[in-house]
Amino acid sequence: MERQWVPGWVWTALVLLHLLIFCWVLRAESWSFPDSGRYLQAAENIRLHGELYARPWTGAQPQGQAVQEFTIRTLGYPLVVMGLGRGSSRLWTLLVFQNLLSMLNIGLVLTWWARRAQPTTRQWLVVLVGITTFPAQFIYANAVMSEVLLQTVVLTMTWAVVAFIRRRQLRYFAVGMGALVVALLIKPVFYPLAVVPAVLGMVLVWRWRTAQSLAILGLMPLVVVGMYMGWNKQRTGYAHFSSIAEINLLHYNAAGVLRQVAGPAAEEIWVAGVLNDASVQPNFAARQQLIQRRAGAVLWAHPLVYARQHAQGMVTLFLDPGRFDISHLAGLAEPGGGGLLAQVRAGGLLRALSHLPVGLLTVLALVLLANGIRLVLAARGFWRLGTSGQKLRNGRWIALGLLVYVALLTGPLGAARFLVPVWPLLLAFALVGLKWPDEAEAVSAVNQTAPMREGQC
């Protein structure tokens, strides 16, 4: 069985798709999303004032709610924006970089699959349609958002951990831990994951009775989290990783429960009351702790409602067609009432859909259908990898673990945007579900290519 690479016409199509969105975004200046302004401002403040702060810097110490802007964005992506985009003065270089990363990420997954599955031309056409029907990949490659950069880091982390499981070489574990550190500095959703390698490193040292370096490397992400929280305490008086946790807890988790239980009016009154009480607290730590208590009390009072919303968000993460993303790219006005998931909970989904253009509704329906098919293929691919060699069986659990982890941590916020960082893992499962050699073919392919790999090493 000869190795197969990604055909040139597939690469051409991917380049053209990225280039088309890139040119459209530059022409329409639609690279800015709701979070983009804070990234740009944080980058500008780092460059001019040496301060990681997501609002205009006046030089005076912020008070009350304004203190949250010190930690609402973690350090990683603003540094990239500062380095490549020079704040907002040269954003096209940042977008070119992100488009290159997007093509690299997709290409790595396609190459991994092609070299094993030997797909036909018809199957390559299906794959290209499958990639095209996840528009969030192309949209966020052309936005001042951290999703595609994080996607590259997640793929690096996955590859390194799987390589470590296969070869038990310390360098792969070190790369994986380094990638995890970068990931948590780009997006706070990854900082709770730092506990896992710390525990894993100590377990492996105990089982193997050697390699104390594993324990040291495994603790590295946790140490970085601790140092980062200490830095935030120095700046805000409160030891925490990111203020986005309390923002989501108040405005999405608890508010979403109240909206469903008592209606939008009661939700607004309650949120305003919590913010008013928080504003009179003596310091930022007391403010954040009050939000945690009030929001936590709502969740504990309605655990089943919240559990249902959390589960809905996790499902939506994988199925969301990305109405907001596509509407923003096309310059369409957003209907009132929030996102589709929020309107489902409020009973206004049909009203929201009735205000959408027919063309957009058609696109959303096709993307939703493609997302459903992709999930079915991914489930099939996960099962198929379970019948493959030991290395692939182990690797599939790493990929599945990251997919489930992001879905769990995202919870009620589930949307296409939050799937982007781990979407290549889902794509890899779906590709295997589309075509994969049986066990005899896989063993034959491995035996034929093993001498070449050894020679190259």
Image (cartoon, rainbow, N blue to C red):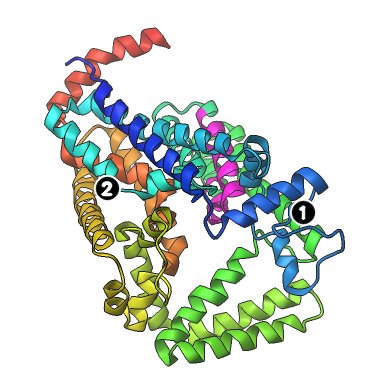
| Residue ranking furthest to the front | 27
In percent of width and height, residue 57 lies at: 79, 58
Amino acid type, callout 1:
Trp
Residue bearing mark 2: 133
Locate residue 133, reporting x and y percent. Answer: 27, 47
Residue at the extreme right: 60
Task: Decide whether the magenta segment is chiefly helix, strand or loop.
Answer: helix
For residue 283, side relative to residue 449 (left or right): right
Q: Is residue 158 left or right of residue 134?
A: right
Tell me if residue 311 can be seen: no
Instruction: Rate crowding at label 2 as few (under 14), some (14 to 19) or many (20 or more) other CA atoms within 10 Å.
Output: many
Q: Which mark is residue 231?
A: 1
Vertical placement of residue 119 versus 40, above or below = above
Q: Report the label total.
A: 2
Q: Secondary structure at mark 1?
A: helix
Separation of disc 2 and disc 1 at Cα?
A: 42 Å
Label 2: state its secondary structure. loop
Disc 2 residue type (three-letter)? Thr
Residue drawn at x 23%, y 49% is 374
* Residue 415 shown in magenta: no
User: Is 415 or 225 nearer to us in this picture?
Assistant: 415
User: Quick check: 11 above or below 53?
Assistant: above
Q: Point out residue 164 in the picture as x, y percentages from the top left corner.
A: 45, 31
> With respect to residue 283, does 75 lie above or below?
above
Where is residue 110, by image quadrant?
Answer: top left
Q: Which residues are magenta?
A: 172-197
Report if residue 192 is visible in the image: yes
Q: How many residues crowd mark 1 within 10 Å: few (<14), some (14–19), many (20+)? A: some
> Which quadrant is home to the C terminus?
top left
